[in-house]
Image: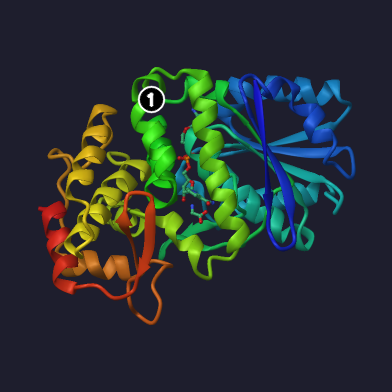
Amino acid sequence: MKKTLEVKTGTDKYKIFIGNNILSSSGLLIKKKLVSQRVFIITNKLIYRLYGKKLENSLKKNKINFSKIIINDGEQYKNIKTVNLITSKLLKYKVDRNDTLIAFGGGVIGDIVGFSASIMLRGINFIQIPTTLLSQVDSAVGGKTGINTKEGKNLIGTFYQPRLVISDVSLLKTLPKREILSGYAEIIKYGLIMDKKFLNWLLANESKLQKFNKKYLIEAVFRSCKNKAIIVRKDEKEKNIRAILNLGHTFGHAIEAVNNYQKSLTHGEAVSIGIMMALDMSSLQGNNLNKNINIIKDHFEKLKMKTKIPNNIKIKTSINKFKEIMNSDKKVKNNHINLILLRNLGEAYLANRYSNRNLESVINKYIN
Ligand code: NAD
Ligand code: GLY
């Protein structure tokens, strides 16, 4: 079973293939997108050990020449040093403008490879083969690329669309449960911000999704990407509406920062707590959400997603410090934090006017 979607922006158009066991036939899909018959697979040791041969066999079958570049695994390597390593290796291999990079991994690899592709020879083609749920439903689609610096996450980056996205849900069977839940936070986000029907479908099929039913997983990835494609088509460069895709993220990034980016909380876990904070803030702002917040909280708790900072994590921060960190987010304009809030389930808006007291009360509830 395979589903296909198209992403269109003002200047680009590409397909997303979503299915079970489609990595083994990926060579054929890739071949159609190549200019030269040379690709560079960029991945990490773990993903290469798990799935590298499957990808390489499919490339060989389709007579595509490939080289691989292995980078370190982890958010801490999403930096300029790794970009240097990738670009130097590509130059050593005498990469040319007709070659293609393949980002084979989760969001970290996708973001670094996309960034490297966008600056290599002023831009060469790249293909995303996302291997985590988060990357399949979010980061591999829409063309945001980026790296971290000591000043913050993803502050250096480009908008640069891939030529093709291949999402094989069978790869998710080796993904740790925590990482699956990180991805699920992004899935539910689409329901909350723009698609009540999808949200209801997710709530109704909680147990099937929990059991990794492939048919339901493909449907969830497909509907997530479809929603993302709608937004990206309207606003590729995040001038306005694309910002709603960041529901819970400004809160979440601040949680990650006050936890010093330690592994005790993943990005997705911080985002799911951030979503709960955004829902609370929406409610305090007078949007009629009280009953609905409990429905979402129950759903998160049933799936064992985080709804608050766990008691064993000791956060040392203050309301002001937390706000200061939120203020260093990319979504800040004219020194003012713009929040993504919900008017109702399935309807998000960008709030640049809200009560500071409400914001402080939400932060206080979650950090203490
Ligand atoms: P990740 O890429 O770090 O992957 C998580 C872990 O899972 C890694 O250790 C990885 O090696 C491992 N892994 C990957 N695939 C696996 C598989 N199939 N089986 C077993 N293990 C596997 O994390 P992520 O959650 O995929 O991505 C997070 C990153 O994505 C962050 O840097 C975030 O900023 C970025 N992001 C970008 C966008 C965007 O639009 N560009 C959107 C959301 C998040
Ligand atoms: N992940 C948010 C975006 O792509 O805009």
Q: Residue at x 40, y 66 (%)?
A: 151
Looking at the figure, which quarter contains the N terminus? top right
Badge 1, how many Cα within 10 Å: few under 14, some, many 20+?
A: few
**Residue 180, position in %: x, y?**
41, 30
**Residue 44, position in %: x, y?**
58, 34
Amino acid type shown at disc 1: Asn
**Residue 220, position in %: x, y?**
49, 32
Q: Residue at x 21, y 56 (%)?
A: 288
Above or below, 110 relative to 351: above
Q: Would residue 225 be seen by someone viewing this image from the given angle?
A: yes
Colour theme = rainbow
Q: Which residue is mark 1?
A: 205
Q: Residue at x 69, y 20 (%)?
A: 54
Q: Would residue 309 be seen by someone viewing this image from the given angle?
A: no
Instruction: Locate residue 122: give its quadrant.
Output: bottom right
- Disc 1 residue lies near ligand 1 with CB under 8 A: no
Q: Secondary structure at mark 1?
A: loop
Q: Residue at x 70, y 58 (%)?
A: 118
**Residue 25, position in %: x, y?**
75, 22
Seen in the image, is 316 located left or right of residue 235?
A: left
Q: Nearer the viewer, residue 154 or 280?
A: 280
Q: Nearer the viewer, residue 8 or 273?
A: 8
Instruction: Locate residue 336: give its quadrant.
Output: bottom left
Seen in the image, is 328 located left or right of residue 131?
A: left
Q: How many marks?
A: 1
Residue found at the far bottom of this picture: 334
Instruction: Locate residue 32: give its quadrant.
Output: top right
